[in-house]
Amino acid sequence: MGTIFLKNINKSFGSTEVLKQLSLDIQDGEFLTLVGPSGCGKSTLLKIIAGLEQQNSGDVIIDDKNVNSTRASKRDLAMVFQSYALYPHLTVRKNLETPLKLRDYSFVERLPLIGNFVPSRKEKKKSIDDLVFKTSETLKITELLDRKPGQLSGGQRQRAALGRAMVREPVAFLMDEPLSNLDAALRVHMRSELSELHNSLKTTFIYVTHDQAEALTMSTRMAVMIDGELLQLDTPSEVYNNPSSLRVAEFVGSPKINTFAAQISSDGSVEFMGIKLERKFNTNSQKALVAVRPEHLEITKDSNKPAFEATVSYRENLGSDIFYHVQVDQSESKIIVRGSPQAGLISNGETVRISPSHAEAMLFETSGERIR
Amino acid sequence: MLARHYIGESWKHGLLIIGALIVLIPFYMMVSMSLKSQQEIQSISGGLVGAQEIQTFPVCTKHGYTEEVCTMRPYKYNFWFAFKKAPIPRYLMNGLIVTVSIFLIQVLIALPCSYALAKLRFKGREFVFSMVLFCLLIPVHAIALPLYVMLAKAGLVDTYAALIIPWTISVFGIFLMRQFFMTVPDELIDAARMDGMGEYSIVWKVMLPVAIPALLAFAIFSVVAHWNDYFWPRIVITGNRDLFTPPLGIREFRGGIDSDEFGPMMASIVTVTIPLIVAFIVAQKRFVEGITMTGMK
């Protein structure tokens, strides 16, 4: 079991409120990512779940037990840190053994020298050895067991840190940006390995990251946090395709979503950049924002399609895609459009006609709420 | 161009060499005098080791040894007589007992203190730390008298305790270790807490091993200071020669009928200094590491 409920968590450091009335419901066996820009309180939330930080008010409930006053070590959670936080003076084997020894040995058995003479220790030592071996086999670090962390590469340290978390077979894993110290290629590789690990362990993973690519690729559900508030909790595709507010829409997706000022007439039809959307919306406001992702804007030569004109100012060629940064006369901000390489290159300074996909355009209040 | 460069460099080196000589000459004289005879010392002759002529030493015979026993080469005499005249091994032993106990108790107290000051959040932490800094400003001599009175009232004068107790709380040690612990990442401590360690286990099983270089630097400071300390032992050890530390022991060679015999005196000083020099050479690399790491110079 590994269900975690957070109820109305508040946390402030001095006068700065970091978390505001945050509630979250994490199901058993799910891979939940907490994603948000740096400073949004996601790491603090993870520490509160872990018990390393005490919330000002609110409840943390793990497996139907309120753990507000339970110490970090008694919550049966394991954490993987960004800097790995392996004990630098111990070998990988000792690093993996430490949490098990602290959990399984009694006080007397932990004593140096004297502990060796307690008969029950031998048996426990055997089971610890077995667990360490099993874990190291799963993570393919068996040959590294007798090295110290200083002698390992970044990826190997990452595995060792994962191993230290895994040996205890905790009810949930907490991961605080575990991949951000790795180089780009290794990060992508570890992403898939973590997903596989999650599939085989079937334990709850709570994963903090500021990298939306990690959140989108790995998680079963992602929780988007901005400024200490939980803005949306949903599957990655739902968060991407159907954001609940403009802030979520702007945070998730790279390059960033394009926004246009729009007028709404009394019958609910929406007009922006001289284009009338086919759909009608039910709202009382007259002004709103239309947001369209770069891939839902099309550079067209068809003069019958409703479109607006813009000048290409910069071209970003990623191989599989080309992103054109275009300038529209009236607005000062740039718009990003995805073009396919097959369509042929358009050079800087050229004027193009851009037509939005009507079905994918999203409408937001000027304050940021979604209008459906 | 190149020549000018060398001239510029050479004067820097010249200055450094002069500085080094100022520091080294007393050591040279100490070693040299410990090897030479009294006449050579007084006439400033004989270079580093002197002529080393076999001779009979008058001070020795005055102490009641036969002439046969007192006839030997000066270097041998100086060291032999130094050990005959004062129980130098005993003094060295005392020095060892006192400095090691002081250092161990200092670590025992400073480590948890500096851990709390660096890593735990509690009300008044900054105030406590500023008090620690404040205590760094108090010279020992200012509080020597009240300390002595306290120890005397407790009946501890002329004991090892009197030599050790006043130094067990090292403000400098707390400060040094706190600065070092500030550089230890919080994540390491959080990881230890997740693994189930208590705060004391964290101090002894995580922080202590991590802090070995800084501790070594502190060990040198502490051991050198208390090994060489003359002021405090002179105050609290009033008569019992069995408790003399090495600096007090050296004092034995001053005064009395043979007050001017420098050879054995220097020989005893060499004996007392050697342990420190050996310790420093052994720990030198880690020592420099420890100092540069904590940003102290």
Image (cartoon, grey):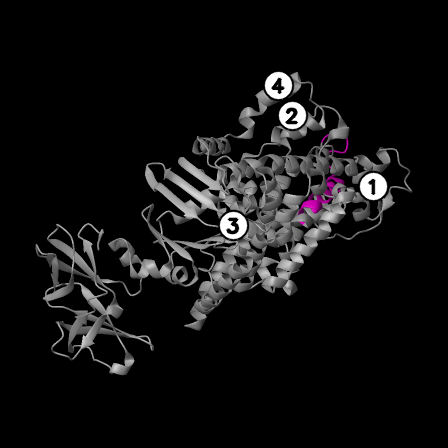
Q: Which chain letter matches label 1?
A: B
Dot 2 corresponds to which residue? B235
- Does the image show residue A55? no
Q: Report the amino acid beneath label 2.
A: Ile
* Nearest to the observer: residue A281 or residue A156: A281
Which marked residue is nearer to the observer: mark 3 or mark 1?
Answer: 3
Q: Are marks 3 and 1 in contact (CB under 8 Å)?
A: no
Region of the chain picked out in magenta, as a range: B255-277
Q: Are marks 2 and 3 in contact (CB under 8 Å)?
A: no
Residue A329: percent from left, percent from top: 11, 68
Q: For marks 2 and 1, give the CA distance.
A: 35 Å
Dot 4 corresponds to which residue? B149
Residue at image x 81%, y 47%?
B76
Which marked residue is nearer to the observer: mark 3 or mark 4?
Answer: 3
Residue B277: percent from left, percent from top: 67, 48
Name the secondary structure under disc 4.
helix
Name the secondary structure under disc 1.
loop
Q: For marks 3 and 4, give the CA distance.
A: 61 Å
Dot 3 corresponds to which residue? A172
Tell me which corner region of the image, top left, top right, bottom left or bottom right, holds residue A336: bottom left
* Magenta region includes residue B273: yes
Dot 1 corresponds to which residue? B57
Neighbour tally class for label 4: few under 14, some 14-19, many 20 plus, Cα within 10 Å = few
Residue B164: percent from left, percent from top: 66, 30
